[in-house]
Amino acid sequence: MERLNRTTAPQARTYTEKVIQFGEGNFLRAFIEWIIWKTNQKTDLNASVVVVQPIEKGMIDWLNEQDCLYHLNLQGLDKGQPVDSVDLIDVISRGINPYRDFQDYLRLSEQPEMRFIISNTTEAGIAFDPSCKFTDEPALSYPGKLTQLLYHRYEYFKGDKTKGFIMFPCELIFENGKHLKECILQYIDLWNLGEGFKDWFLSACGVYSTLVDRIVPGYPRDTVAQLTERIGIEDRLLDKAEIFHLWVIEAPKEVSDEFPADKAGLNVLFVPSEAPYHERKVTLLNGPHTVLSPVGYLSGLDTVKQCCEDPLIGKFVHKVMFEELLPTLNLPKEELEKFASDVMDRFRNPFVKHFVTSIMLNSFPKFRTRDLPGLKTYLERKGTLPKGIVLGLAAICTYYKGGMRGETPIVPNDDPKIMDLLKDLWATGDTKKVADGVLGAEFIWDEDLNKVPGLNNLLVELLDKIQKDGMRVAVESIL
C-alpha cells in the first residue's frame, strides 16, 4: 500500500506559513491543527504551521516523511447522533528539529508573515532553567528556545514593532500566558539582552493565557486496520479524538480579528478571563483523569471507558469527581454537577478508546496542577484528607516503581530527575522512605508536602496496602 505524502494525496493544499508551533504530539495535531484547518475553510486566515520539536527526541522525522500530512478520526455523539469522520489535515508545512537544525529554527523568525506561536510542552514545559545559556543551540527549556527566537526576530527586523508575535500557550497551567511571559523576561535579564529588546517584547508581542479541552486518545491502535482500509493509504500518524472541543483564549477582540477561529463555527471563545473555565475543567476533567489512570492500569484496565464502567474502579472515579473534587469548587453546585455528568459521558464515549498509559506521561507535574489544589482545599474545608486523591498519588508512586503488570513491562515516562528519584527511593524497599522522599521533593511541588497534616501517614498506609494486597483491594479500602 502507498504511504501518505503530497504526491499520493494531491488534494492537499498549501497555505502561507504564519504559525510556529512547539510540539508535534497527538493532542496538538488533533486540536490546534484541526482548528486551523477548519478556520482556513471558513475564513481568510490562510495559515499553515511550522512545527518545532521541543525536546531532543520526537516525531518530526515521521512528520516530514509524510510531508506533514495525516488523517484525523473524530468520533462521538452530536445531539444523540453518531459522528465518525476521517479528514486529511494538511495545514502543517514542515517540521524542524532545533537540536539538529538550529539555524533553520532561527530563520523562522526572519519570515515577515509569521505571526502566531502556539505550544503544548506539557505542564513541565513552561519553566525557567537558569542553566540555559543564550549561546546554547538550542537552549534546553522551551521558554529559553522561544527567547532565542524572539531576539533573533527583534534583531533581524531592527526592532520593528509591527513584527511582534501573538503567543497562545496551551500547556495546562492556570495563567499559562503569564507564566510564559515571566520566564521570557527572566531570560532577557539573565542573558543581558537589553532594554530595547525587553521593550519590543512587552509592547510588540502578546502572550495570552488559554484553556484547551478535547479528549485525544491519539494513535488508534485498536482500529488502525479498519481506518487504513477506509482511507486507502498507509498513514503512520493517524490521530483520533472526540468531537467535543473548547478553546478559551484570554485576549482582546483585535486578537480574534487576526485569528478568527471564533468566526468559523468553532467552540473557540475570546474572553476577559479564562479563570472560571480553567478551574472547572482542570479540576473535574483532568483531575480525575490523572488519578484514575494509574489506579485503573494497576487494576488491570487499559482505557478510561473501562475504568468508568468497571464496578469497582467506576465507584472510585465517581468518588473522586463528585465527593472529593467537586466540593472544592466555588461555582453553583447544580452547574458543577451538570458539567461533571457531561464529563462522565465523555469518559464513556463508546467510539473512543483513550488508553490510560497515554495520560500518564509526566504524572507528577500533572498531579501538582490538577489534583493537589483540590486535596488542599478539601482538607481545609472538611478537616480530613480526600482518600481517593491520595490513593491516586500512591498509585502514581507505585506505577513509577516499574516492574511488570502480568506479562507487560511497566514503563513510566517523566523528567529524568523524577525517574531517578523514584528509582532510588523504591530501591530502599521502605514505603516510608518512598513517601518521605516523594512528598519532600520540592523540585516537583515547590514545597515540602510532608508538612501537609496527615498526608505522609496516609500515603504510607496506602502504599503498603497496594504492595501487600494489590490495587483493587486498596480501592475497596477507601470506598
Image: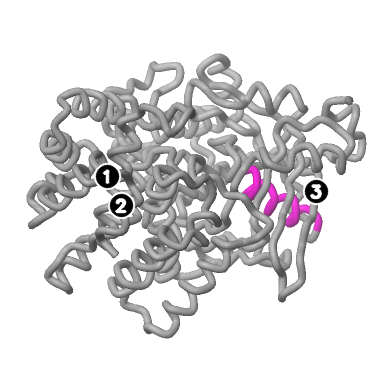
In the image, residue 298 above or below residue 53: below
Disc 3 is placed on an element classified as strand
Which residue shows up at 45% across the image and 50% down it?
207
Query: Which of the pair 248/65 is nearer the observer?
Result: 65
Main secondary structure type of the part rendered in magenta: helix
State the image coordinates of residue 203 (x, y, percent, origin top left).
Answer: 44, 50
- Marks 2/1 in contact by CB < 8 Å: the verdict is yes
Provide the residue designation for mark 3. 87
Crowding at label 1, few (<14), some or many (≥20) Cα neighbours within 10 Å? few
Q: Quadrant of residue 196?
A: top left
Q: Quadrant of residue 412?
A: top left
Which residue shows up at 49% across the image and 59% down it?
310
State the image coordinates of residue 418 (x, y, percent, origin top left).
Answer: 28, 30
Which residue shows up at 58% across the image and 37% down it?
25
3D distance between C-alphas at marks 2 and 1: 6 Å
- Marks 2/3 in contact by CB < 8 Å: the verdict is no
Which of the two discs, 3 and 1, labels the residue nearer the N terminus? 3
Dot 3 amino acid type: Asp
Disc 2 is placed on an element classified as helix
Provide the residue designation for mark 1. 469
Magenta-highlighted residues: 28-41
109 in magenta: no
Dot 1 amino acid type: Asp
Provide the residue designation for mark 2. 473
Q: Quadrant of the C terminus?
A: bottom left
In the image, is 293 to the left or to the right of 75? Answer: left
Which residue shows up at 85% across the image and 40% down it?
13
